[in-house]
Amino acid sequence: MTEPTEQDAAPRPETPYRWVSKPGRIREDRRFVTGQGRYVADITPPGTLHVGLVTSPYAHARITGVDASEALALDGVVAVLTGAELAKDTDPLRQYLAVPEVQWRPLAAEETRYAGEWVAAVVAESRAVAEDGAERVFVDYETLPAVLDPEVAAQPGAPLVHPDHGTNVMAHREFRWGDVDGDLAQAAGTSRVRSRWNRNSTVPLETFGVVAAWDRGRDLLDVWASIQMPQFPEQLAHALRIPTNQVRVHFDVDVGGSYGVKRGIKHGVLAGYLSRMLDAPVKLIEDRAENMHGGDFHGPDRIFDVELAYTAEGIFTSIRIDVIDDEGAYPGRSPLQLAKPIGAIVGPYRIPSAAYNATAVVTNKTGQVAVRGFGQAPTNYAIEAAVDAVARDLGIDRVELRRRNFIQPEEFPYRIPSGTEYDSGDYPAVLDKAIALADLAALEARRDELRAEGRLAGIGVATCLEPGGGNAIFENIMNPANDKTTFPEACRLRVDGDGEITAIISISSAGQSHDTMVSTLVGEELGRDPETIAVIRADSLTGMPSQSPVGSRMTIVLGQAIRGAADELKAKVRAIAAHNLGATPEEVGYEGGDVVVRSDPARRLGWRDIVAIAHRKQHLMPPRTQPGLEVVHVAHTPRSGGLAQPDGTVQLYPCYSFEAHVVLAVIDPGTGAIDLDRYYIAHDCGTVINPDVVRGMVYGGTAHGIGVALYEQFAYSPEGQPLTQSFMDYLLPSAHEVPQIADTEHCTPSPFTSLGQKGAGEAGYMGAPAAVAGAVNDALTAQGAAPIHALPIKPSDVWSALRAAGNEERGGK
Amino acid sequence: MKPVDFELHRPATTDEAIALLAEHAAEAKVLAGGQSLLPLLNFRLARPDHLIDLGRIAGLAQLRRTQDELVVGAMVRQAQAERSPAVAAHAPLLAAAFPNIAHPPIRNRGTVGGSLAHADPAAELPAVARALDAVFVAAGPRGRREITSRDFFRANLMTDLEADELLVEIRFSRAAPHTGADFQEVGRRRGDFALVGAAAQVTVDDGLLSDVRICLTGVAQTPHRAVEAEDLLTGHAPDPALLARAADAIRDTIDPSGDLHATAGYRRDVAGVLMTRAVTGAHRRATETAAEAA
Ligand SMILES: Cc1cc2nc3c(=O)[nH]c(=O)nc-3n(C[C@H](O)[C@H](O)[C@H](O)COP(=O)(O)OP(=O)(O)OC[C@H]3O[C@@H](n4cnc5c(N)ncnc54)[C@H](O)[C@@H]3O)c2cc1C
């Protein structure tokens, strides 16, 4: 699927680092490739009971009765729990907006608000029997009017998903930054694009799963989960009405894919409740259908109206983005995804003013959750579609138009109208690299040859940002009552009596290679070989504050914590050594674990000797020094700390990675089938920690973006029935659909992180949907057809666009 | 996604299988390669009490040639037939169809008989059987009977087989010399069930088309034999104007439905495009074989 690029063969630029940025073993790969991963489904404490779910067949209905007697009579069925029973003893799941009327519960209590919503849980000795039981729970429903279209839902008079809230609009915020009216008045023209990012998600191989085991003797709920979620333990405890220090979430569980969606709070509450109720370990592993329509893990589902104003020379003067997001039935955290893009609302372009009108509505669909980029990828797509429209309207080359409007390298840190400062970047250089890699002139020649042969062909270009180092300040923007301003990450470094180093973190990982990242950074900071550094995951009670790997933040924020911990550790090592060398700590230097008197390098103390003193020789320790070599450092997100201004201005994320995509699409004029022929990316995430990890992120994210552009959609019938209940209809791109991707890296270090690193967890995905759509539209518009502005683009959409333009192929080719 | 509890039977002979079917008919399902049935079981859309696995019946997995026919046992794996020189030589359309079915691992398990008995109107093999007027041989407690391909496919996922009958083999007439075939389809991804597909096999006689066989997938409840197009093309050279008329004849006679993946209008129109390509491809191959033979 991927080929090494020429850049790989070229000598790498010298870096000041010993291990960072150098090719190095990806530590976790061996375990995954040899099937030694340990996932939640692998964890089955003795006596485990299994959960099956009764789900609503209706998009909206009142529950008038539940008869579980037949299920309970079944051999092996232990219990049946209804929503009403669960609601008596638990609190609703957390809402981040101020919407107290929205009661989100693991099991619907009085009303079901989407087809597939859980209504009752059956607990049995095996999952198969639990499913048998679930079929024998009979629920009486009175159907209610449902609303599926988000624009209809936002209108007065629409059926209400939560009648007590009085409207389906859960949030509406209007922002204006800079002199929008003045800039519009001065513009020579504007291009408008209405675009549709249909409902999709990151769809992991592993569905969500949880095992909960209540220990009555210890008053402790042990939880193993396929989890990637900030505050999961606390929210579990709150919903279950038990103290937070009675919930222990284990993070040494491999997570089989996530990119945001492994939240599973309702799953955790349900399993935890059942375990306490039945005094037994309880396991709930979603099957694919449950995952797809009842897992509350869908991603953004948006309609954009973008207006981009420009001068006659094609200089952007103002942008207006109106967006309506369909949250599904329970908004939870998802509306916050409308706020994050404020931090990159003008993309990589110098646009002096911006207006942003964001509306979150609920409909009778399964709930949304955070998805890779937290709303940025759809916004990037909408912005890039508008940029391409300006190029068409003005007859300016798309690449040239982007160049004219890029923020220039010398302008950083660059403050965008919405208040965020971009840290660093060199957009023209990265675009140049993409063009060189693609050999754009040759690619255009190839496109034109294909066209001459009677095929449709088009080139797509996208230049997009990836905000990294996420904090949670978008909570404050969308709901001023949320005044959370820090989103910390922590690392504990432990040097044992033998001098071996263990780094302890308190997060689980979903394929991001954190073991590799942490060991490389700790090794670099301490000057010790990363191969020798163990990485261990503490649980939520023995560990430190962590927000989990969201917002492309771990290398940045955990990197900051590692820097802090290493500095503290080194200070202690130097103090011990200085004391024994008859010098002051200021007079000695730390050299890869040894400590040397700077003025007299012959006077030195070795790592092992220092370790021995710290652990075993109180008589050689400086006074008032704790024994051992153990430090914990908790770091804020860089550049966080401020509350949002009333107009929404705030420093959102600290770091801004950048990527430029160039792709050639070839389209069969008779069938509309789209084939991506060549794919090139230049990418800049500052200092790369491990080149293979970054390349893997770029490739994977691009494949994901191709899926969004051409294949993936969670669709519903007008009545609210899910039409995509398996991988037969929810189409993930396979190796056949993802072309060879050539990637080249550029490095503009961030001035705000420990080693200049930025985020890479959303790489590729930030620009691929825009680039692929751009390629299809280049092909269509060359044929006189209208561009398509709704994803995914299907062959039949292409066919319709060609037909509407009078292009018909009645056979041939 | 766990199947309802069932009892698994693994008969060693066809007779044993038929006896089991006779005993359990209404509550039984026959298991071939499992590539369609296992998902149905796991979704609990199929809920048999008894599953009769044909995997151990060696007699059902044979591919043989007679004087005039190619006889494919129901349990011949799709991959096995795909690689068979006999299939390539005597039923070129069948050979052309296989690479379009799913992916290699699925064809390793999936059987020819299973696909035909499943009778998905989007599937390739039913269209091939219908195009080639294959004869289906069923066996049951009342003995054996032959079913024409016209009668075999009743509706979406419905065949003429009785609940206690087994499909044992499928007979294809051996292709005449100077015959070529092509299978054209379009799907959203490679290996997916096609949105619409066209199977064509033609024999070339003095540069003209004879014995034209065209069948479409994905446009009706059963494979759609495009007789109007066949009639228009028979006896003529496949020139663009004639092909265009044949394509329009198809568009005028079919009434496909739309779904999430493609509109009805798309299927109707593209059926004509794919038929044109398939006939053109089949003609080219037939001409090539004629040239090779000469
Ligand atoms: C991911 C995926 C993609 C696929 N894509 C395609 C595709 O593009 N095109 C395509 O055509 N197919 C496709 N298939 C289906 C595949 O071709 C199946 O192999 C085929 O449909 C069924 O054959 P089987 O041997 O697996 O039968 P099974 O699944 O075992 O059986 C199918 C049905 O036929 C019945 N049956 C089987 N054998 C007999 C018999 N001898 N007598 C009576 N009844 C019998 C069974 O009872 C069952 O109802 C795909 C499958 C998968 C999993």
Image: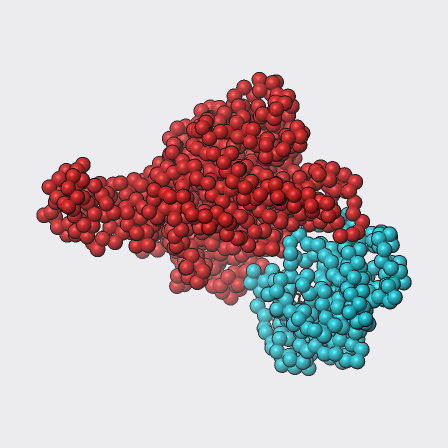
Chain colours: A red, B cyan
Is A738 on the left-hand or right-hand side of A617? right
Quadrant of the rendered image holding ligand 1:
bottom right
Total number of numbered discs in the rendering: 0
Question: Can residue A131 be spotted in the picture?
Answer: yes
Query: What quarter of the picture does the C terminus of chain B occupy?
Result: bottom right
Q: Position of residue A694 (x, y in %)?
A: 45, 47
Q: Is residue A517 above or below residue A132?
A: above
Q: Residue furthest left?
A: A619
Residue drawn at x 36%, y 40% as measured from the top left = A755
Q: Nearer the viewer, residue B127 or A288?
A: B127
Q: Nearer the viewer, residue A156 or A69?
A: A156
Query: What quarter of the picture does the N terminus of chain B occupy?
Result: bottom right
Residue drawn at x 79%, y 40% as measured from the top left = A806
Is A588 on the left-hand or right-hand side of A87? left
Q: Nearer the viewer, residue A273 or A718?
A: A718
Residue drawn at x 90%, y 63% as measured from the top left = B235
Where is residue B34, by image quadrant? bottom right
Q: Is residue A810 above or below residue B184?
A: above
Residue drawn at x 60%, y 55% as measured from the top left = A736
Where is residue B174, by image quadrant? bottom right
Q: Position of residue A368 (x, y in %)?
A: 54, 42
Q: Position of residue A72 (x, y in %)?
A: 52, 60
Is A671 on the left-hand or right-hand side of B7? right
Q: Is residue B6 above or below residue A237?
A: below
Where is residue A751, by image quadrant? top left
Q: Nearer the viewer, residue A761 or A596?
A: A596
Question: Can residue A652 be spotted in the picture?
Answer: no
Is A1 on the left-hand or right-hand side of B167? left
Q: Position of residue A794 (x, y in %)?
A: 67, 47
